[in-house]
Amino acid sequence: SAVISQKPSRDICQRGTSLTIQCQVDSQVTMMFWYRQQPGQSLTLIATANQGSEATYESGFVIDKFPISRPNLTFSTLTVSNMSPEDSSIYLCSVASGRNEQFFGPGTRLTVL
Amino acid sequence: KQEVTQIPAALSVPEGENLVLNCSFTDSAIYNLQWFRQDPGKGLTSLLLIQSSQREQTSGRLNASLDKSSGRSTLYIAASQPGDSATYLCAVGLTGTYKYIFGTGTRLKVLA
């Protein structure tokens, strides 16, 4: 299994600002994923991040709002841009093992005022 | 489009009971299915992974079964304990991708 850490663990931000969330994995992985979990809801995939290429975004999510970097095989960042209260969620990164078992980080709890 | 539903949405049981959580999916062409546990405000912990060719997986007091043809999976928890209280999520892995579609979750409370 992979050990995944995220920073920050939580933050309270003002509307109109941006927050960058970091995800660090203890081993090299090809694919990393970013999910959003809105209050009381299940997880929704935002995008898939491969090293050396542009992230692939799911329907309803755009790069201008959620830019993603993947500079190497152990690290990725997700930025939530021009935030509004509707962006208040838990943001989670995950990785897939060789047999497509997914492992998740502890999440970043974001509150936008 | 794959949709994943979990029933019941919430469950409260006395300690020691055996219980079953249900997960159903609309498209049987899945790659695998994974059960997770999520504690309040936390990330997800992987419990069991079932490949599409398997019928069940066991880990300790947990047993997960998969019936692809009927689009169902169950998570059986034996001799429940207060520490089992959490939200349980099932996620279906889509064939040909690394994407997962998550269910709506079952919020379990085990009373001491």
Image: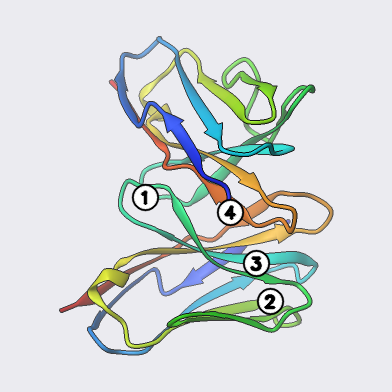
* Dot 2: chain letter: B
Judge whether B85 appears above or below B101 on screen.
below
Could you tell me how far apart the alpha carbons at marks 4 and 3 are, in whole angstroms?
17 Å
Residue B90's spot in the image, x, y percent?
54, 65
Label placed on residue B33: 3
Q: Amino acid at mark 1?
A: Gly
Could you tell me how far apart the alpha carbons at marks 1 and 4 are, in whole angstroms?
28 Å
Judge whether B18 appears above or below A89 on screen.
below
Q: Nearer the viewer, residue A97 or A10?
A: A97
2 and 3 marks on the same chain: yes
Label placed on residue B71: 2
Q: Tag 3, which secondary structure?
A: strand
Q: Tag 2, which secondary structure?
A: loop
Q: Which residue is mark 1?
A: A40
Whether residue A72 can be seen here: yes
Q: Which residue is mark 4?
A: A1
* Dot 3: chain letter: B
* Dot 1: chain letter: A
Q: Splitting the image into 4 quarters, where does residue A57 fall?
A: top right
**Mark 1 or mark 3: which is in front?**
3
Is the C-beta separation of discs 2 and 4 under 8 Å? no
> Mark 2 or 3 closer to N-term?
3
Residue A18's spot in the image, x, y percent?
44, 13
1 and 4 marks on the same chain: yes
Q: Is residue A50 left or right of residue A36?
A: right
4 and 3 marks on the same chain: no
